[in-house]
Image (cartoon, grey):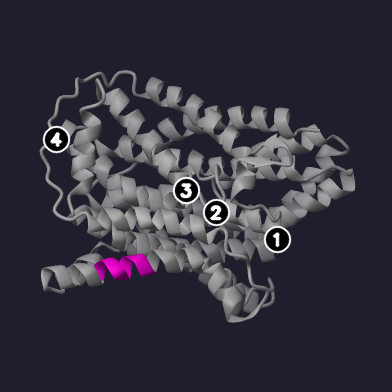
């Protein structure tokens, strides 16, 4: 276990130091874990490593990237940027409003997909106002991560919780006669809005713009809306128990995003009488982000197989003893810290059965711990640039646009935003669901 932990820490240190090489660092680290697995240090093998990759997330990212390319080509982002600018008094409110807008979308769409949808608007606003797009896109990313915990379809971690605890879409709003986690997330969003207003307090430049951009095609916008609606509907599909149907069920969100992208590409080819859009979609595909996530899934599987995450989970119970409140507090804030460096998807998947087991030993309902885990793991990713897939996607977009994102640029926004939202959710969940 010590060897796995050392490799893991070195991997993340290198990724933080050499951001432009992060995909290759993650893939190299995954290869090291697999080799050591075959040498007998771990139980990890190539098939088990590949099986640990969340292909649903990768398909969702790839498919949404294609739809976003069509969305940008339609010029709708530029028009939305102009509409938003005309409604706010200055840059401070423009950035905050855009982050909240991203949050609302992310409550119903995976946070990475949200970043891919809203980032073009943020880039367009930054260009019009002649400000750096770095803090704008970071604000979009962290707000998307926050709201991803609000509903069943908002984030992969929410989907994991819903499946494990047998929760449906409406349970996130109201469950067992009590308000659900949705309302705690929204309270956190409200408090974090004031945090953003404070962070951008000096950006008081007046906003003056006209709505001049003409949208050339509304179909890509309909495709974006259709993505949201289909993802919501997919959450109500009953889960098959076995066979190809069970496999497709696990990939349903990714397949929806990919199918909508393909439909949009075919439509555009027919409308324009040209296949140029196919080349454009392939060129705009952020391969670095996909490769990075592919490698990280395998790295996390490596440390999971080595017992690193299980050891930490067992530590929770030894420290908490018989106190549900102390256990809840440990789960929330340990999850915040760990998710700043560990991808929250495999972490949540690993911790859910642990949380259930500990709550059973204590003789209490597990929901307060489930919600605490989801809150901490989802929001903790906002503490570092590599703590959440949405952050990685946003930084990838900035890099493609020639921007360099320094760690301190991210921390300046991520830390106050995260802590204000976490503390709000932490208090709400215990007051409503606590023992």
N-terminal of the pair, mark 3 or mark 1, is: 1
N-terminal of the pair, mark 1 or mark 4, is: 1
Residue 429 at x, y = what percent? 68, 33
Residue 149 seen? yes
Q: Which class describes the residues within 10 Å of circle 4: few (<14), some (14-19), or many (20+)? A: some
CA distance for labels 3 and 1:
38 Å
Magenta stretch, residue numbers = 259-265
Identify the residue position indicated by label 3 in the image. Answer: 108
Secondary-structure class at tag 4: loop
Q: Which class describes the residues within 10 Å of circle 2: few (<14), some (14-19), or many (20+)? A: many
Q: Are marks 2 and 4 in contact (CB under 8 Å)?
A: no
Q: Which class describes the residues within 10 Å of circle 3: few (<14), some (14-19), or many (20+)? A: many
Q: Closer to us: mark 2 or mark 4?
A: 4
Which residue occupies 38% across, 59% down? 289
In front here: 37 or 233?
A: 233
Q: Is residue 260 magenta?
A: yes
N-terminal of the pair, mark 2 or mark 4, is: 4
CA distance for labels 1 and 2:
18 Å
Q: Are marks 3 and 4 in contact (CB under 8 Å)?
A: no
CA distance for labels 1 and 4:
58 Å
Q: Closer to us: mark 2 or mark 3?
A: 3
Identify the residue position indicated by label 4 in the image. Answer: 211
Rendered-image quadrant of the N terminus? bottom right
Residue 34 at x, y = what percent? 58, 74
Residue 268's tag is: none
Identify the residue position indicated by label 2 in the image. Answer: 343
Q: Is residue 51 magenta?
A: no
């Amino acid at each position: 276990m010590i060897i796995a932990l050392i490799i893991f820490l070195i991997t993340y240190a290198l990724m933080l130091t050499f951001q432009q090489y992060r995909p290759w660092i993650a893939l190299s680290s995954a290869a090291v874990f697999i080799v050591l697995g075959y040498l007998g240090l771990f139980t990890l093998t190539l098939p088990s490593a590949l099986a640990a990759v969340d292909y649903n997330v990768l398909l969702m990212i790839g498919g949404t990237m294609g739809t976003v390319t069509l969305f940008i080509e339609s010029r709708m982002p530029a028009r939305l940027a102009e509409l938003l600018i005309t409604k706010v008094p200055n840059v401070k409110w423009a950035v905050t409003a855009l982050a909240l807008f991203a949050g609302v979308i992310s409550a119903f769409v995976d946070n990475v997909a949200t970043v891919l949808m809203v980032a073009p608007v943020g880039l367009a606003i930054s260009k019009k106002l002649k400000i750096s797009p770095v803090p704008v896109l970071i604000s979009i990313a962290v707000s998307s991560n926050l709201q991803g915990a609000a509903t069943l379809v908002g984030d992969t971690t929410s989907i994991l919780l819903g499946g494990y605890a047998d929760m449906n879409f409406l349970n996130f709003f109201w469950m067992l006669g009590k308000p659900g986690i949705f309302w705690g997330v929204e309270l956190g969003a409200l408090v974090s809005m004031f945090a953003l207003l404070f962070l951008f307090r000096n950006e008081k430049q007046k906003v003056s713009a006209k709505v001049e951009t003409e949208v050339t095609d509304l179909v890509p916008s309909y495709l974006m809306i259709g993505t949201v609606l289909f993802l919501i509907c997919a959450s109500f599909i009953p889960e098959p128990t076995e066979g190809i149907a069970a496999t497709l069920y696990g990939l349903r969100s990714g397949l929806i995003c990919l199918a909508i992208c393909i439909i949009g590409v075919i439509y555009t080819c027919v409308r324009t009488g040209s296949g140029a859009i196919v080349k454009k979609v392939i060129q705009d595909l952020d391969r670095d982000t996909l490769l990075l996530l592919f490698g990280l899934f395998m790295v996390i599987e490596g440390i999971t197989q080595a017992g690193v995450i299980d050891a930490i989970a067992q530590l929770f119970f030894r420290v908490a003893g018989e106190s549900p409140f102390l256990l809840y507090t440990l789960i929330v804030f340990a999850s915040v810290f760990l998710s700043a460096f560990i991808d929250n998807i495999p972490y949540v998947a690993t911790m859910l059965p642990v949380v259930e087991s500990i709550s059973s030993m204590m003789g209490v309902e597990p929901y307060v711990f489930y919600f605490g885990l989801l809150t901490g793991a989802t929001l903790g990713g906002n503490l570092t640039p590599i703590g959440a897939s949405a952050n990685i996607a946003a930084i990838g977009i900035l890099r493609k646009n020639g921007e360099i994102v320094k760690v301190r640029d991210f921390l300046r926004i991520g830390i106050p935003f995260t802590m204000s939202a976490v503390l709000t959710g932490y208090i709400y969940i215990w007051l409503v669901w606590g023992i």
